[in-house]
Amino acid sequence: MIAFYRRESRQRPRERPPGIPTRIGTAGSFSAPPGTRVDPADPSGYYVDLRSKAVSSDWPPTWHRRDKLHVGLIQWGLGCHERYLAGDGEEWLEAARWVAGELLELQQPDGRHAGGWVNESPYKHTYRIAPPWLSGMAQGQGASLLVRLHRATGEERYAAAAVSALAPMKKPASEGGVAATLGPGRVPEEYPTDPPSHVLNGCIFGLWGCYDVATAVADPGAAELASEGIGALADSLSRYDTGWWSRYDLFPHPVTNLASPMYHRLHTDQLRATALIDSDPRFAATADRFERYAASSRNLARAYSLKVLFRLAVPRNRWLAHRIPWARDENR
């Protein structure tokens, strides 16, 4: 087991701080404006600002449970690191390092899921995924956090764990990884489904992790993954463009899964950030189109109504999923 950073003296009973989101890492709680400290040549500030995820620097967070999706804790750690960069105090760096300690302890040292952070609970809505499973989004964001902590502290164990976190991106979900083919190359899958779901925001978060490791650690394997994946995404951007709004994913649902207005904004910001690290003009051009789409009140109303239609066909609520006749097969 890799050693990890922990100071037991900081662990104390506390009340739940006001404002802590109850659905960390989910559509209902995600708030991520563009990052303000992004340096493509030196991963420091994150590409989107996750400080809204980190309301308190106390750790462990009261909502944290190891059997929940790891991506929530990782986003909290990235938010803590962003607050540290903003000058909010050393306690935020300490909180981010506690998250890194959790990641180092939980990272699989070998076997089918080597390098991964295994989710031990099923994913039960939109896609049906049985445990154990990995998320390409968690692997990428975890790697991004670890290389930033390596930069802040100089500790090599963070860099080594970041490199290991990309190992699952080299093999498909059927072999315990998170890779899926999109157009001409491999990209990380947020949700390892068959057929691939290709969730746009999760794919980009995963690719940012590859880029960060390639840039910060000069790892050739990470550079290959970043180049292949970013190129494949650029070639496939048109598949996410309906001509008036963005798609959340490419999964063959009974109804097209459009992005919610919040995720549509996130897509736009993510594409602009990706344009900072890659010269392909399609990222900025697609972001421009997505921004124009969102400026139309007609498009916005249409997106809301079609998202409601999607949720009638593919309910998020498990009770409904077992009772609406047309959704039963889709939600088994």
Image (tube, rainbow, N blue to C red):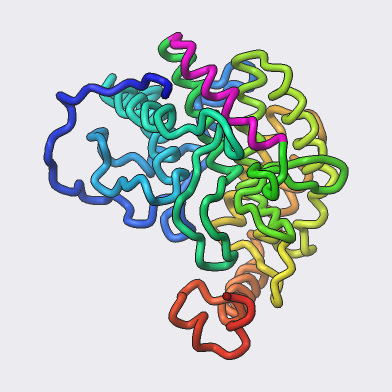
> Who's the residue at 61% across and 43% down the image?
136
Residue occupying the far right of the picture: 184
Quadrant position of the N terminus in the picture: top left
When asked about the image quadrant of residue 260, the answer is bottom right
Residue 106 located left or right of residue 194: left
Residue 277 to residue 196: above or below: above
Quadrant position of the C terminus in the picture: bottom right
> Who's the residue at 66% across and 68% down the image?
257
When asked about the image quadrant of residue 330, the answer is bottom right
Q: Residue 67 at what x, y percent from top left?
A: 38, 50
Classified by dominant secondary structure, the portion drawn in magenta counts as: helix
Q: Is residue 236 magenta?
A: no
Residue 75 located left or right of residue 187: left
Residue 64 located left or right of residue 105: left
Looking at the picture, tell me which residue is in the foreground, 196 or 21: 196
Q: Is residue 115 visible?
A: yes
Q: Which residues are magenta?
A: 154-170
